[in-house]
Image (cartoon, rainbow, N blue to C red):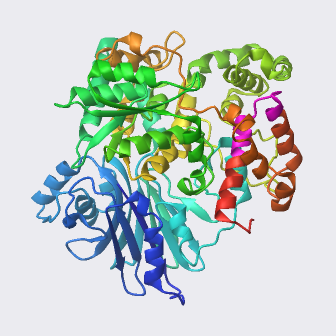
Amino acid sequence: MCGIVGFIDVTYGGYDRQAALSSMTVSIRHRGPDDQGIWMGRDDEAALGHRRLSVIDLSSAAHQPMVSGNGRYVIVYNGEVYNFADLRAELLAEGIDFTSEGDTQVVLEACAAWGVDAAVSRFNGMFAFALWDRREKSLALALDRFSIKPLYWCEHGGVFLFGSELKSLAAHPAFRNDIDRGALAGFMRYGYVPGVRTIYAGVHKVEPGTVMTWRPNMGVNVTRYWDMREVANRGLTNADTRSEGELVEALDDVLRAAVKCRMVSDVPMGAFLSGGIDSSTITALMQDQSKVPIRTFSIGFSERGYDESGYAREVARHLGTDHTELLVTEKEAQEVILKLPSLYDEPFADSSQIPTYLVSALARASVTVALSGDGGDEMFGGYNRHVLAQRISQVFAAVPYSVRKGLGFLAASIPQFVWESPRRADKIAKLAAMMRERTVEDAYHGLSAFWNPSDPVVLNASGEIAGWHKKWPQFGGAAEKMMLLDAETYLTGDILTKVDRASMGVGLEARVPFLDYRVVQYAWRLPMSVKIRDGRGKWILRQVLDKYVPANLIERPKMGFGVPVDSWLRGDLRDWAEDLLDETRLNREGFFDVAMVRRKWDEHVSGKRNWQHQLWCVLIFQAWQSFNKFTRSV
C-alpha cells in the first residue's frame, strides 16, 4: 500500500517543478514510510511521485515510479491486485519479461499489453494508479470498484494535479483552496462530503469503477468498467435458487477464496476483531486457512455500552488467535481528536474514526497488513434500516401522510430524558423524523442524514446541493434499494474513507475481503429471505459463521463502533467545543447560521436534547478549517 501524486503543467510555470513534486510526495509520507521515488519527464510530460509501504516484493526491483518494458508508459500505483500471479503467468506466456516479483509491474505491463480498460476489468483488488503515456501525452487515472483506495484531481490555471490525498494537491503552488459551500452543506447532512465533490471548489474524486483519461487542452474522458447498479440488477434477475444449505456452502466457498487471496504478504499481517459478525467471520476464515495463530487486535472502552472487547476476547480464545487488546482511556481517545484535521484532510464527522485510528495504531505496532470486516452490512442487510425496510413500506402505504406527520412531530417534542439513554433517544428521534417524510425514498435519505434540508445551517449554499443523491433504484424491494444506495454512497464516502485514512495514517494496509468483486456479485444473487429473517439481518452470514464460532459468542444487539461524544461534549470536551462554537467567531467566519448552531449547542449541554451528530459535524469543520487556516470560500 502506498501513496501517489503528480502533475502536468502545460503552462511551464515559473516555479521549481522538482521542488513542487517533492513537496507533494513528502506530504503523504505516512502512506508509504519505506521508500520514496519521483519521475520527471520533459517539460511537456508528467511529473510523478510515489511513497511506498513495502508489502509484496520488498526489494528495490519494485521501486516506483516504474517504466514499462517498452519505455512508453510510466506508472505510480497504490494498492494490491490479489490475482496478480495469474495475470503475470498470462503475460509471461505472451513474451513479456519481468524483473519484479510484485504486482506493480504486472499492473503496468497488463495495461501496456491489453489497454487500461481491459486490464482493470480483470484486476481483483483495491487500487488507484496513474499511468502516463509518453507517446500519446495522456494520463489515465484508474480506481478500484469501490474506491477502497482514494484518488483526487483538479485542474487549476492550466496545471493538472492528482494525488492520494488532498494535502498532496495542496502542496503544489498552483492549488487553490476555495471552500465549496455546496459541498459543505453535503458534509453537514451526511458527515462526509458526498459524491465526486470535495470540500474544495473545483477539486474532484475519481469515481469508483472508472478510468479517467486526461489530455492537455482536451479535458477529461471517463469510462466505466464496473457498475454496482448493473451488478445488483443482474444478480436479482438471476437469483441462486438452490437450497439454503447449498447457498450457505457456496457463500462459505467464495468468502474463503476472498480471504485466502488477501493473506498473501511478505510482511506480518493480522485482523481487526470486534467480536461482531463481520470481523469474526473474516477472522474465522483467516484462522482456518492459517497454519499458525493469526494476530488479532481489538480495543475497549471503560464507558458502558461502548465496549465490545470482551466479546472479541471470547471469539479470539475460541479460534485460537494471538490476540492483542487495549483498554483505551477517555483521555487517550480524546487526544485523537486533535489529529483528525490532519488525518482526514477534508471534514469527516463519523466519530467511529477515533476507535478506528486507535485499533489501527495498535495493530501497526505488530503487523503491516490487517484484514477488516467492512462491507458485510451493505452486502448482507446488516443495518437496522435494511431490516425495517419492508415494515416502513407497509406503514407508509397504510397510514396517511398527515397522520404520520402529526405523530412524528409529537414524538419529536418529547424530552430526551424520558427515553433514559442517549442511544434510545437517538432512535426515537430518527423514527420521529422518518414518520414526517412523504415517501420511503425520503425516509431512507432522512435516516441517512444528520442535518435536514429544512435546517439550512450552511449560509449561501442554496442551489448547490444537486447531485448529492444517487437515483432511487427502479428495481428490487425497499431493502434491496436501501442496500444498493448504501453500497454506492455511505460505504464509499464514509466507511472506506474512514478506514483508509485511519490505517494509512499509521502506515497500516487494511484489506477488505467482503468487497472482493466475486463476493459482491454472489451476494446480490442471494434471495433476500436468506439475508433478512425474523427481524434480523445477515442471516446467511450467521450460518457461515456458525460453522466456526458458537452462536452464543456472537448473538447480541448490534452496537456499532462508536464513542460517547454526547457526554464528552458536556464534559471534558466542553471548553474545546465552546471555543470552536464561539458566537463571535462563527459570525466572523460566516459559514453557518449562528443562531441555529448555538441553539442546538445550548440544548445539548443542558441535557434537553442530544444533538451530538449535528454538533460533531460543525465542530469537525471548525477544527479542520482552523488547522488549515482558510481565508477564502465560494
Q: Is residue 594 visible?
A: yes
Relative to residue 227, is residue 256 depicted above or below? Answer: above
- Residue 418 lies left or right of residue 530; in this view the side is right
Relative to residue 588, is residue 401 depicted above or below? Answer: above
Q: Which residue sits at x=35%, y=66%? A: 76
- Residue 545 lies left or right of residue 291; in this view the side is right
Q: Nearer the viewer, residue 313 or 396?
A: 313
Q: Nearer the viewer, residue 625 or 428?
A: 625
| Secondary structure character of the magenta stretch overall | helix
Q: Nearer the viewer, residue 117 or 491?
A: 491
Q: Which residue sits at x=36%, y=72%? A: 132
- Residue 289 lies left or right of residue 375; in this view the side is left
List x then y, in percent, for residue 345: 57, 57
List x then y, in percent, for residue 67: 26, 73
Q: Is residue 200 visible?
A: no
- Residue 45 lies left or right of residue 629; in this view the side is left
Q: Does the magenta run of residues contain 116?
A: no
Dividing the image into 4 quarters, which one contains the N terminus? bottom left
Quarter of the image for residue 292 reads: top left
The magenta-colored residue range is: 604-618
Quarter of the image for residue 290 reads: top left
Q: Nearer the viewer, residue 72 or 601?
A: 601
